[in-house]
Amino acid sequence: QVIRALAQRFTGLVRSGDTVAHWGADEFVFVLTDIRDRATVSTVIQNLIEGLHAPIEIDGQTLVCTCSIGCSIYPEDGESADTLLRHADAAMFQAKERRGNHFQFYERALNQQVHQRLALNMALRDGLAADEFFLHFQPQYDVHRGGIIGVETLVRWSRPGIGMVSPADFIPVAEQTGLIIPLGAWILRRACQQYMAWPESLRGFKLAVNISFQQLEESFVAMVRSCLQETGMPAERLELEVTEGVLMKDSAYLEATLAEIKALGISLSLDDFGTGFSSLSYLQRYPFDQLKIDQSFVAKLPEDGSSGALCEAIIRMADALGLNVIAEGVETQEQLNYLKAQGCNQVQGFLLSRPLAADDLLVLLNKPKGSQSSVDSAVFE
Ligand code: C2E
Ligand code: CA
Ligand code: CA
C-alpha cells in the first residue's frame, strides 16, 4: 500500500513526458528527459524529497517515508541505459550512507569506492557459503581472582588469496548491505555450538556475542530462540553486546525486543560505552545488565586525567544503577591497577590475553584460575 501511494504521488511530481517506474522492492527509477542542466535536476529531486515528506495515511496509521536518491546524466555519466542505471545505483548507495533524505550525483571517484565495497560484499557472501569465517574468543577476567569469567566472540575472515581481513573492515560493509543478518546469525549459532563443545566442567563462564544494530529486525528474537534450542546453549550464560547505535531504532520496538531477549534469560551488555549518544536516560529505560568502558578511554590511562575521570564516573554510575562494568582494551599493568583501584571488577585486553582460537582457549581454561592469563598471578590478590 505504501508503494502504491508513493507511486501515485511520484507521478504527480514529474512532468508529463517523464517516466516513473517501480524497480522492485522499495526502489523507483525516474527518467527525466529534456534536462537543461544539473540545476534543473536538483529542483526536480528537491520536489520529490518534499513530496515524499508529507505523511501517508494507511489503515489509520500515519507513516512518513525517507528516500535516498542517486542520479546519473546522459551522456557524460554513460551512453547506455545499463551504464546510466548502474551509475545512478552507485550514487544512491553513497546517498544512503548519509541516512535520511539525501541525493547524490554520480561521480567517477565515488563509483570506484562503491565498486570496491560491492566487490567486498560479494566476496563476503561467497565466503559465508564457502565457510571462510571462523571465530576467536577473547577471555574476560575477574580482577580479584584472575580467573576467566567470560569470553567475547570475535569473527575472523580468512579471504582466499588475500589472507586475514579485519572485522573492522568487513563488518561495516556487511552492515550496510544487510549481509550482517545471515552472517550475524551464523556467528551466534557457531559461537553457541563451540561453547557447548568445551567440556562441561569448564563451562562456568559466559559467552558474549556482538550484535549489530541492523540485526535487531523483526525475526531476530525468533532466530535467537531457535539458536538456543538447537544448540542447547543455556540462555543465562549468553550475553549480547550492542552499541549505543541501537538507540536509533524506534524506541517502542527496541524496548519490546530487548525485553523479549531478557525474558529468554539472556543478558545485555552496552559496548563502547561513552562514545555514542549523550542522553543517559536510556540506561533506565532499557534493561542493560552491563556497561563496557570503551577502549579509547582505557588506552589513555593512567596519564590522561580526563579519561581517568570518565572511567571513574562510569564505574560509579554503573555501581549506583546496579550494572556490572567491564573495561576493554587493557594493555598495560598500570591500566589494570588503575581500573582495579577505581573498583572495576572485570577486564579484558591484550595484557591478559589476545583473542584465541577455541583450542587455545581450552588450554587456558584447564589451568588454575590464577594462571589463566599472561599476567603473573601475584597481580591478583
Ligand atoms: P569490539 O566489539 O569493540 O571488539 C573489541 C576489539 O578490540 C576487537 O577487535 C579486539 O580484538 C580488540 N582488542 C581486544 N583487546 C584489545 C587491546 O588490549 N588493545 C587493543 N588495541 N585492541 C583490543 P576486532 O576483533 O578487530 O573487532 C573489531 C570490531 O569488529 C569489534 O569491536 C566489533 O565492533 C566488530 N566485530 C567483531 N566481531 C564481530 C561479530 O561477531 N559481530 C559483529 N556484529 N561485530 C563484530
Ligand atoms: Ca564488543
Ligand atoms: Ca567495544
Image: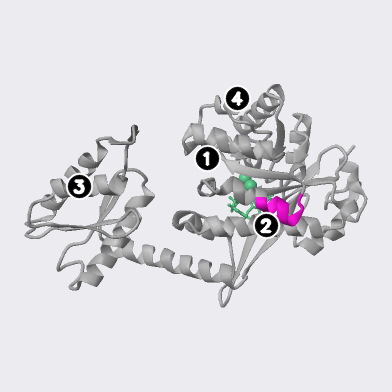
Is residue 355 something one can see in this rendering?
no
Q: Nearer the viewer, mark 4 or mark 2?
A: 2
- Residue under label 2, please give it: 189
Which amino acid lies under the numbered mark 2 shown in the image of this protein? Arg
Question: What secondary structure is marked by label 1?
Answer: helix
Q: Label 4 vs label 2: CA separation?
A: 30 Å
Question: Which of the two labelled residues, at mark 3 and mark 4, occupies the earlier sequence position?
Answer: 3
* Label 4 Cα neighbours within 10 Å, binned few <14 / some 14-19 / many ≥20: few
Does 62 sit left or right of 126 as displayed? left
CA gap between label 3 and label 2 equals 44 Å
Say which residue label 4 marks. 284
Picture residue at 30% right of the left edge, 61% below the top: 89
Give the mark, 2 or 1, whose residue is nearer the N terminus: 2
Q: Position of residue 64 (x, y in %)?
A: 32, 37
Instruction: Give the foreground label among 1 and 3.
Output: 3
Q: Counting residues from the N terminus, which is met first, the one under dot 1 or under dot 3?
A: 3
Q: Nearer the viewer, mark 3 or mark 2?
A: 3
Q: Which residue is mark 3?
A: 8
Q: Name the front one of labels 2 and 1.
A: 2
